[in-house]
Image: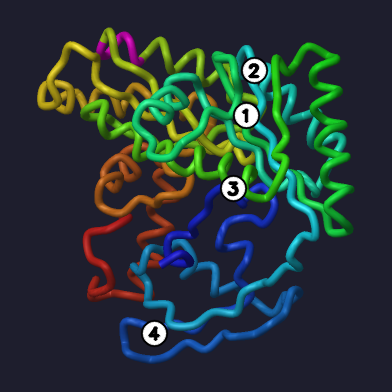
């Protein structure tokens, strides 16, 4: 499942999506034949890279039954920090600073707006407030060291100290223990569930170039209010790889049903902004059936034609996950 959807998450900044972690696959084809490509090679230029046709194909070309995956040494040190910020532009500046100072040791960088932060404090079970004061935006940052815990701690403190001196960071706290670091991550992982008690929502799993995130957030906020004044934008996600969960909760004085009737115009409005930045309408959750028609309508016709040719070559009878993707 993770390979078929080319899954990603908070670790993509450091380790990549599922496709980047896969060296080889075994696949049962629509004919019943088994394609065995379980090689362990990092370098192999012998013809087409067939495994990557199946990774991310959502089961439409065959069923992945085995895989060879890359493994990484467990870091000896893992330091997590929560920072309060004034804006997405400040978050981008902090990310740039962190990449400059930490490089590959920066293993996660999450962006959280105040609204999902407040929802989590309001509805989360066993949640503690990471920072004493409220901020318009927050960043959760993780630095990992292959040498020692002390190295990681010194590096993340150096980044935050520079951020405070440059006026990028308003306030920040570094985890004092593994348990506190886990608590910071638990706060982040609890965010999606804490949107549910606020009523119906229209969700978007999008990606844009990292440098365009602040401008996208500003532009998208305007179109959301045009479609439905009073809608509440719930924005959070993986800033380190350009992937945002740009969700819209219904206005406080609306009922769920009339708000959900705006699904298609809201979806189109947000996705039009995404496309204006040459972004993706599905960063990590795939196409499936829900986004199939939109993909077909908006992707370059040549891309759809090529995908359909691949599908016809592997599965002319259309028996593999029918009705999905294309």
Name the secondary structure under disc 3.
helix
Q: Earlier in the sequence, mark 3 or mark 4?
A: 4
Q: Which residue is mark 2?
A: 85
247 is higher (above) or lower (below) than 31: above
Q: Which label is found at residue 182?
A: 3
Give the quadrant of the C terminus.
bottom left
Q: Which label is found at residue 28?
A: 4
- For the residues labelled 3 and 4, the Cα–Cα distance comes to 39 Å
Q: Nearer the viewer, residue 154 or 3?
A: 154
Residue 281 appears anywhere in the view: no
Residue 129: x, y in percent?
53, 28
Residue 323 appears anywhere in the view: yes
At a point 76% along the width and 68% down the height, the residue shown is: 73
Residue 303: x, y in percent?
44, 50
* Main SS category, magenta section: helix
Q: Earlier in the sequence, mark 4 or mark 2?
A: 4
Chain part drawn in magenta: 224-228
- For the residues labelled 3 and 1, the Cα–Cα distance comes to 15 Å
Name the secondary structure under disc 2.
strand
- For the residues labelled 1 and 4, the Cα–Cα distance comes to 43 Å
At label 4, counting other C-alpha atoms closer than 10 Å, the crowd grade (few under 14, some 14-19, many 20 or more) is some
Q: Which label is found at residue 139?
A: 1
Q: Nearer the viewer, mark 1 or mark 4?
A: 1
- Could you tell me if the residues under marks 2 and 1 are in contact, i.e. CB atoms within 8 Å? yes
Q: Nearer the viewer, residue 128 or 53?
A: 128
Residue 165 counted in the magenta span: no
Residue 131 in the figure: left or right of residue 27:
right
Q: Earlier in the sequence, mark 1 or mark 4?
A: 4
Residue 95: x, y in percent?
72, 30
């Amino acid at each position: 499942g993770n390979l078929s959807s080319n899954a990603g998450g908070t670790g993509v900044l450091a380790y990549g999506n599922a496709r980047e972690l896969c060296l080889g696959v075994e696949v049962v084809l629509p004919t019943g034949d088994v394609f065995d490509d379980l090689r362990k090679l990092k370098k192999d230029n012998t013809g087409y890279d067939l495994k990557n046709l199946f990774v991310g194909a959502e089961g439409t070309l065959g069923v992945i039954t085995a895989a060879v995956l890359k493994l990484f040494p467990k870091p000896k040190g893992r330091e997590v920090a929560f920072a309060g910020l004034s804006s997405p532009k400040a978050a981008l500046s902090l990310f740039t600073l962190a990449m400059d100072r930490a490089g590959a040791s920066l293993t996660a960088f999450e962006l959280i707006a105040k609204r999902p932060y407040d929802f989590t404090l309001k509805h989360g079970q066993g949640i503690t407030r990471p920072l004493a004061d409220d901020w318009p935006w927050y960043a959760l940052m993780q630095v990992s060291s292959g040498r020692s815990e002390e190295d990681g701690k010194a590096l993340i403190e150096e980044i935050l100290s520079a951020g405070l001196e440059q006026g990028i960071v308003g306030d920040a706290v570094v985890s004092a223990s593994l348990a506190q670091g886990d608590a910071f991550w638990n706060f982040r992982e609890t965010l999606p569930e804490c949107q549910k008690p606020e009523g119906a929502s229209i969700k978007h799993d999008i990606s844009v170039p990292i440098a365009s995130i602040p401008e996208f957030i500003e532009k998208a906020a305007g179109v959301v209010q045009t479609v439905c004044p009073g809608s509440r934008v719930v924005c959070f996600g993986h800033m380190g790889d350009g992937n945002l969960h740009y969700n819209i909760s219904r206005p406080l004085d609306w009922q769920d049903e009339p708000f959900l009737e705006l699904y298609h115009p809201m979806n189109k409005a947000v996705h039009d902004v995404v496309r204006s930045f040459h972004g993706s309408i599905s960063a990590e959750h795939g196409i499936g059936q829900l986004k199939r028609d939109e993909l077909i309508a908006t992707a370059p016709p040549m891309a759809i034609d090529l995908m359909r040719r691949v599908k016809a070559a592997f599965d002319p009878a259309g028996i593999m996950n029918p009705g999905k993707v294309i």
